[in-house]
Image (spheres, grey):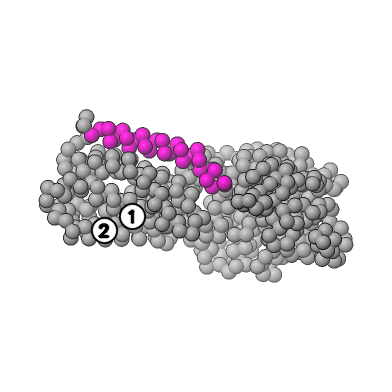
């Protein structure tokens, strides 16, 4: 059925003039989303406090389970650290799009003239900052409890941490969007994220273990760094391409 | 050029067709009341017009542009079932976030201006979580009007409003209509809606059962439309 709603007065009197396009850069919009998320989180500190507390508890409990001075521990120190980051990170990432379900805030963002990719990046940068904050607290505690001299290869360790954290951020933020309307999203997010994270986690674990043992990045382990960078690039690109379909359906 | 052109829109939820080949054209300056019983498809249609959901078939054009284009979204103001405001942010912060996303030249000035127009200037620094339902709704109205959109899409705008909020909203909608804005609103509250509606579209089980000008008979007897076209 074709229906046309028109009156002579409405049709004739109103002329819609094309408007000048407001000049706001994409970066400014991305920053608006990032700042909004960080400000919201800082007001409640729900995810940040839970994540930091969780990582500290895990680190303390594991220190009772293993002998930190043993040679065997040196072989999985990086693995332990990244497991802590991943589990604690899930608490932050779960909140990312869940925050937008309250009051249907996501509708407000989707109706605004901002590309879904920019919305995704804004939220990913906020998550990245929060995960880095958790790691900045966790790494010194890890060094203290496990007698690990993490500052020895600080620059390279920072690079591996940044690349691994971005991998966790980008996958976690994407699946946070995908699972936002699921009732069991707290369970679904880790279930979906961890299997996909395996290549990046393995590379980050190996590199971190080497760096904590005092071995710098060299020809033997540089593949892990390349894998991390490639993983970040590919999954960032995939997320940016697919996020509009995920959010609008 | 139509303000809103809905062309052959179908929407399926699984196998269930929530909308069946909906065709509707809303001309600039019209004020359309989208009527229908619960589950008729009003909200689904409004969400598709607003670009919040994609149709299974067909398309929606806003002033000639696809609704998912930024150009189109800049020209619409949406007020859905939820208020789309952040509880942890203040009233002014909420409006400034959206003012920035819409690229307004002075976000703070725009936010304060709309807080004043909706009678919320005294609580501009109060967190939204501390607001009453009516205050939240007024702030949501301010958010929808903030960027001076040419097309206003409101889903049940009068629901759960106190008298003051209804008065504020009716004044704003009347002003917007007088200024030549196009208004599409879904509602159950015919009395309030028909005050400003120039046109009426009735949805029955996902189909447009009636679309045309609002008549005096509809205003005098709000049940007439349902009795006549839903039988």
Write down the region rendered in magenta: A221-249
Label 1 marks a residue whose chain is: A
Q: Is residue A34 left or right of residue B26?
A: left
What residue appears at the point 50 percent right and 38 percent down from the top-left corner?
A: A241
What residue appears at the point 29 percent right and 53 percent down from the top-left corner?
A: A84
Q: Marks 2 and 1, how far apart in space?
A: 9 Å
Q: Secondary structure at mark 1?
A: helix
Q: Is residue B212 left or right of residue B70?
A: right
What residue appears at the point 20 percent right and 47 percent down from the top-left corner?
A: A76
Q: Is residue B206 magenta?
A: no
Q: Residue furthest left?
A: A70
- The answer to whether any part of residue A40 appears in the image is no
Q: Is residue A172 left or right of residue A24?
A: left
**Quick check: A76 above or below A101?**
above
Image coordinates for residue B134, horizontal then vertical, percent: 62, 67
The one of B94 and B50 positioned closer to us in this rendering: B50
**Residue bearing the label numbered 1:** A88
- Tell which circle, 2 or 1, labels the residue nearer the N-terminal end: 2
**Residue bearing the label numbered 2:** A58
Q: Residues within 10 Å of mark 2 (few under 14, many from 20)?
A: some
Q: Are marks 2 and 1 in contact (CB under 8 Å)?
A: yes
Q: Is residue A100 left or right of residue A44?
A: right
The one of B161 and A91 positioned closer to us in this rendering: A91
**Quick check: B228 above or below A124?**
below
Toward which corner of the image does residue B157 lie, by quadrant? bottom right
Which quarter of the image is occupied by the C terminus of chain B? Answer: bottom right
Q: Main secondary structure of the magenta part?
A: helix
Image coordinates for residue B116, horizontal then vertical, percent: 63, 60
Image coordinates for residue B19, horizontal then vertical, percent: 69, 51
- The answer to whether any part of residue B36 appears in the image is yes
The one of A130 and A63 positioned closer to us in this rendering: A63
């Amino acid at each position: 059925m074709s229906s046309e709603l028109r009156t002579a007065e409405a049709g004739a009197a109103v002329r819609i003039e094309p408007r000048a396009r407001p000049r706001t850069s994409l970066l400014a919009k991305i920053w608006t989303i990032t700042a909004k998320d960080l400000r919201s989180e800082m007001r409640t500190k729900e995810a940040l406090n839970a994540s930091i507390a969780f990582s500290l508890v895990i680190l303390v409990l594991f220190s009772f389970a293993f002998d930190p001075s043993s040679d065997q521990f040196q072989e999985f120190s990086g693995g332990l650290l990244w497991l802590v980051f991943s589990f604690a990170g899930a608490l932050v990432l779960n909140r990312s799009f869940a925050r937008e379900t309250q009051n249907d805030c996501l509708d407000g963002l989707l109706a605004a003239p901002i590309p879904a990719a920019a919305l995704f990046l804004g939220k990913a940068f906020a998550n990245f900052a929060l995960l880095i904050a958790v790691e900045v607290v966790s790494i010194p505690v890890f060094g203290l409890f496990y007698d690990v001299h993490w500052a020895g290869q600080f620059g390279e360790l920072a690079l591996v941490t940044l690349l691994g954290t971005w991998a966790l951020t980008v996958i976690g933020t994407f699946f946070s969007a995908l699972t936002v309307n699921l009732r069991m999203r707290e369970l679904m997010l880790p279930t979906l994220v961890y299997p996909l994270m395996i290549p990046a986690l393995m590379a980050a674990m190996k590199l971190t273990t080497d760096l904590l043992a005092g071995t710098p990045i060299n020809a033997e382990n540089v593949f892990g760094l390349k894998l991390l960078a490639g993983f970040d690039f590919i999954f960032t690109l995939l997320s940016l391409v697919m996020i509009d379909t995920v959010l609008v359906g | 050029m139509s303000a809103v052109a809905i062309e052959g829109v179908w929407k399926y939820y699984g196998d269930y067709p929530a909308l069946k080949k909906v065709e509707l054209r809303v001309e600039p300056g019209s004020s359309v009341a989208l009527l229908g019983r619960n589950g008729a498809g009003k909200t689904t249609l409004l969400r598709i017009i607003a670009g919040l959901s994609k149709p299974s078939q067909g398309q929606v054009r806003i002033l000639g542009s696809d609704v998912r284009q930024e150009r189109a979204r800049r020209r619409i103001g949406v007020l859905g079932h939820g208020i789309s405001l952040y509880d942890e942010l203040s009233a002014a912060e909420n409006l400034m976030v959206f003012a920035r996303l819409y690229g307004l030249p002075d976000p703070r000035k725009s936010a304060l201006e709309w807080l004043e127009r909706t009678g919320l200037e005294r609580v501009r620094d109060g967190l939204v979580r501390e607001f009453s339902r009516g205050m939240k709704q007024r702030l949501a109205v301010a958010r929808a009007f903030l960027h001076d959109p040419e097309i206003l899409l409101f889903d049940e705008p009068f629901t759960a409003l106190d008298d003051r909020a209804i008065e504020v909203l009716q004044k704003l909608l009347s002003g917007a209509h007088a200024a030549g804005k196009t208004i599409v609103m879904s509602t159950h509250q015919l009395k309030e809606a028909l005050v400003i509606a120039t046109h009426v579209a009735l949805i029955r089980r996902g189909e447009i059962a009636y679309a045309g000008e609002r008549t005096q008979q509809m205003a005098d007897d709000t049940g007439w439309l349902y009795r006549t076209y839903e039988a």
